[in-house]
Image (cartoon, grey):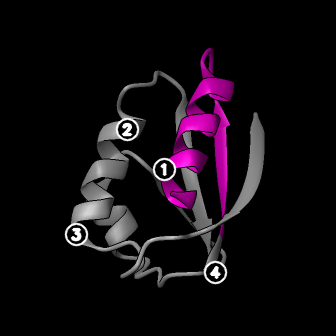
Amino acid sequence: MIKQSVRINKKAGLYAKPVNQLVQTASEFNADIYLIYNDRRVNVKSVLGILSLAIPNQSEVTIEASGEDEKEALKNIIHFLES
């Protein structure tokens, strides 16, 4: 398992369209991927889970990945959140 903190760089934070794109990105990997924000941990492959966190722009979150392609998954998720 690997983890890394990242600052969200999405104009409106993580809402609707960016969440859907994030879930699509995460679904390309076999690894289990979680997003941790304010002591809550949700599966990054769950639209409702991420939306329930209501994460605003410039928030710091932690991404946690475990599985055969965890490094590639973490790299891609972080790239998405920072761009």
Residue found at the very far top of the displayed protein: 68
Mark 4 or 1, nearer chain start: 4
How far separated are the C-alphas under marks 3 and 1? 15 Å
Reading the image, the residue beneath label 4 is 38
Q: Which secondary structure, mark 1?
A: helix
Residue type, label 1: Phe
Q: Are marks 1 and 2 in contact (CB under 8 Å)?
A: yes
Q: Amino acid at mark 4?
A: Asn
User: Relative to 2, does residue 6 appear above or below in the rendering?
Assistant: below
**Camera-nearest label, 1 or 2:** 1
**Residue under pointer 3:** 16
Q: Residue at x 76, y 46 (%)?
A: 3
- Picture coordinates of residue 39 (x, y %)? 66, 75
Q: In screen coordinates, is 30 left or right of 82? A: left
Q: Is residue 43 left or right of residue 78?
A: left
At horizontal 37% and vertical 38% (from top left) the residue drawn is: 25
Q: CA distance from mark 4 to mark 3?
A: 20 Å
Q: Which residues are magenta?
A: 61-83
SS state under label 4: loop
| Residue shown at the point (39%, 72%) measured from the top left | 14
* Image quarter (top left, top right, bottom left or bottom right) of the N terminus: top right
Q: Quadrant of residue 61?
A: bottom right
Q: Amino acid at mark 2?
A: Thr
Assess whether mark 2 and mark 3 are in contact (beta carbons under 8 angstroms). no
Mark positioned earlier in the residue sequence (3 or 2): 3
How many C-alpha atoms fall within 10 Å of the one at disc 4: few (<14), some, or many (≥20)?
A: few
Under tag 2, what secondary structure? Answer: helix
What residue is pinned by disc 1? 80
Res 25 label: 2
Q: First in sequence, mark 1 or 2: give its number.
A: 2
